[in-house]
Amino acid sequence: MMDYTNPYATGSVSEYPEDTRSEFIRKTYTHLAGALVVFALLETIMLQAGLGNAALQLISGGKYTWLMVLGGFMIVGWLATKLAYSATSVATQYLGLAIYTVAEAVIFLPIMALGIAVTGDAMILGQAAVLTGALVLGITTIAFTTKKDFTFLGGALKIIGFVALGMIVVSIFGGFNLGLWFSVAMVIFAGGAVLYDTSKIMYHYQPGQHVAASLSLFASIALLLWYVLRILISLSGRD
């Protein structure tokens, strides 16, 4: 018999009673909202302190600088995810989410500074946030209303993700811009990742993994925001 009160009980959340599933989903999205709020606050503070321009100048200093930044972010992201999936300490799970939130805020600094520089004000950041929020809401609605398990997308998303990463690395070494259509393709990819993560939240996580679930969904939403912002910057530059 399953112990429904044990936060580290085995078995996917779909195997538990309705109130346990609802509580897990509530906790996941509450932690996601908290991470997004902290991300926004950190971004605002750092941009107002002038760190955005400093970050933009840093990555403009050499074509390999951004590659090193991306490599560092991937390492930190891997570590944060490992911590968030800890089955022995809730404090460790929160540490993982906190580290990842700070890392996302730091890596977003140059693109947000670029957006402000291109348009002359910070309105583009709000536009990107609204568009991203609308896309996430639409995707989430699809997942919850159809009740279809979209985790079958996982294999394809992994392959596409590696291909996209390879293209980014090649573009850095080659010194060329991947362009608007790559950003559009990545928005579609990130939307698929949000759909995949939402299905995992509905059906595949264990009841005590709400922190890890919120981190994974936060990562996909951040990726979506990144490329929505890139599209807006690209379109603004064409005016």
Image (spheres, rainbow, N blue to C red):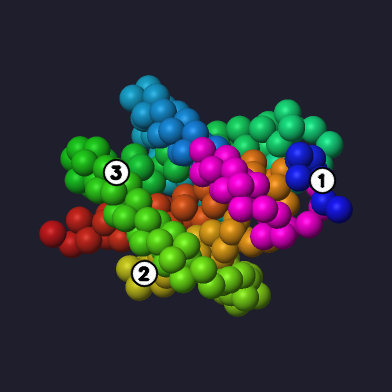
Element class at badge 2: helix
In the image, which is nearer the foreground, mark 3 or mark 1?
1
Element class at badge 3: helix
Q: Is residue 132 left or right of residue 65?
A: left
Sequence-wise, which precedes: disc 2 or disc 3? 3
Q: Within 10 Å of the Cα at label 1, are there few (<14), some (14-19), or many (20+) other Cα atoms?
A: few
Q: Within 10 Å of the Cα at label 3, are there few (<14), some (14-19), or many (20+) other Cα atoms?
A: many
Sequence-wise, which precedes: disc 3 or disc 1? 1
Expressed as whole percent of the image width and height from the top left, the position of residue 118 reads 23, 47
Predominant SS of the magenta segment? helix
Expressed as whole percent of the image width and height from the top left, the position of residue 205 reads 69, 55
Real-space Cα separation, disc 1 to disc 2, in angstroms: 45 Å
In the image, which is nearer the foreground, mark 1 or mark 2?
1
* Amino acid type of the residue tagged 1 in the rendering: Asp
Q: In front: 37, or 180?
A: 37
Q: Within 10 Å of the Cα at label 2, are there few (<14), some (14-19), or many (20+) other Cα atoms?
A: some
Identify whether 228 is placed above or below 87.
below
* Amino acid type of the residue tagged 3 in the rendering: Leu
Disc ID at residue 125? 3
* Amino acid type of the residue tagged 2 in the rendering: Val
Taking the spot 37% from the left edge, 56% from the top edge, the residue there is 137
State which quadrant residue 210 falls in: top right
Q: In front: 163, or 210?
A: 210
Identify whether 220 is placed above or below 82.
below
State which quadrant residue 100 falls in: top right
Expressed as whole percent of the image width and height from the top left, the position of residue 138 reads 36, 61
Q: Which residue is mark 2?
A: 184
Q: Which residue is mark 1?
A: 3
- Numbered range of the magenta stretch: 9-30
Taking the spot 37% from the left edge, 34% from the top edge, the residue there is 53
Expressed as whole percent of the image width and height from the top left, the position of residue 67 reads 57, 53
Taking the spot 55% from the left edge, 34% from the top edge, the residue there is 102
